[in-house]
Image (cartoon, rainbow, N blue to C red):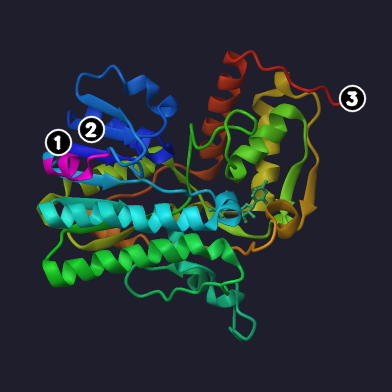
Amino acid sequence: MKILVLGAGGFIGCHLTHRLLQERHAVTAVDLDMDKIADSLNDPNLSFLQQDIRSAEWDLDKRVQDADLVIDLIAYANPGLYLIMPLEVFRLNFTENLKIAEACVRHGKRLIQFSTCEVYGRTAASLKNANLADPEDPIHATFSEDTSEFILGPVSKHRWIYSCAKQLLERVLHAYGLEMGFNYTIVRPFNFIGPKIDFLLHEKQGIPRVFSFFMDALLNGTQMKLVDGGTNRRCYTYIEDGIECTNRIVENPGGVCDRQILNIGSPQNEISICRMAELMREIFAEKFRDLAVRLPDIVSVTGEEFYGKGYDDSNRRIPDIAKVRTLLNWEPRTGIREILETTMRYYVSEYRRNGGSRVPATA
Ligand code: UDP
């Protein structure tokens, strides 16, 4: 197949492009950045365009016309950015993505649109007057594609602009499906993690996700900071498991993914951010002891101190993966400890390769 991958230089995009090339597809990959995709650039089946899709010379229609399938991963998807540039988060994640979807509608192309588990927002158990008999029951935090309600915070908590932009995009794709027979699949990834997830602090501009903050602290002996005590929980999904599922969506046997919204995630990997900090510290001490001058302290900071005004958070989110199990016979394979160890090993080896020297504890 001829596949147009938009956002191929990001975390999910680079792993997906690698896999699509292994599957012998002809890939046109588009991104602003090529660092993460560097090891695929020599593949004869890859054509890479270093391109900002917001620029005037970007010929969206031609690229979409040339493809059999379009996969759109273009997004600002790091929570730190929702706080400091909410307007650009809205413009890229909604306005620019809508143009891509509408080009697919015009040219009758199938679109795989990456969305987010952030659309689900908070859990019912987090509401003040929830009065649930057992608020800890995972049933209250398990989100299903076609039945769960979305619970977002007030407008003044502008973290939710990302969730809301993605939700609106999903609703528009659904409407194009209803009114014009548009063929899309929406993917909601639940915290994919693995090598290349983010650049560490100071390496590149941008605000990474929690794994990279913690990894940076371990390598540099600085504090691991728990936002509001680190009580929020996430279900981490190993990138290779996520890519395996995405590849099955690309193959779309018998059209089972047509006009479907699909969660991809690992419900068994739920962990609080606090426990994740401890586990990463344990793994670092056990496996990378030669780098450990002194293990970092784990401290608590408020959300506002860490992110600034407008911070709010999704407290807990567990994917219901019955749909991908049934439609695609997919099952996540990798447990949380293995995920963290493999990802940490990647960052440690990059750190060594770059001749990094760790700040001694006494400095
Ligand atoms: N977080 C933290 N310390 C950090 C960075 C993030 O405690 O150094 C928390 C953050 O408040 C959130 C969770 O970790 O509750 C996951 O945040 P992340 O940025 O990885 O992305 P999210 O899962 O919210 O999309």
- Residue at the far right in the pictured view: 362
Residue beneath label 3, please?
A: 362
Q: Quadrant of residue 206?
A: top right
Which residues are the magenta region?
58-65
The reply to whether dot 2 and dot 1 touch (C-beta < 8 Å) is yes
Q: Residue, x 50% and y 67% (percent of image)?
A: 121
In the rendered image, residue 348, in percent from the top left (x then y), is placed at 60, 24
How far apart marks 2 and 1 lie (CA) works out to: 8 Å
**Helix or strand or loop: what does disc 2 sit on?**
strand
Residue drawn at (56%, 21%) of the image = 350
Q: Residue furthest front?
A: 56
Q: State the image coordinates of residue 278 (x, y, percent, origin top left).
A: 70, 44
Q: Secondary structure at mark 3?
A: loop
CA gap, disc 3 to disc 2? 50 Å
Q: Is residue 257 visible?
A: no
Q: Residues within 10 Å of mark 2 (few under 14, many from 20)?
A: many
Q: On the picture, is 107 further left or further right than 317?
A: left
Q: Amino acid at mark 3?
A: Thr
Mark positioned earlier in the residue sequence (2 or 1):
1
Q: How packed is label 1: few (under 14 Cα within 10 Å), some, or many (20 or more)?
A: some
Q: Single out the mark in the foreground, 3 or 1.
A: 1
Q: Earlier in the sequence, mark 3 or mark 1?
A: 1
Residue that numbered label 1 is attached to: 2
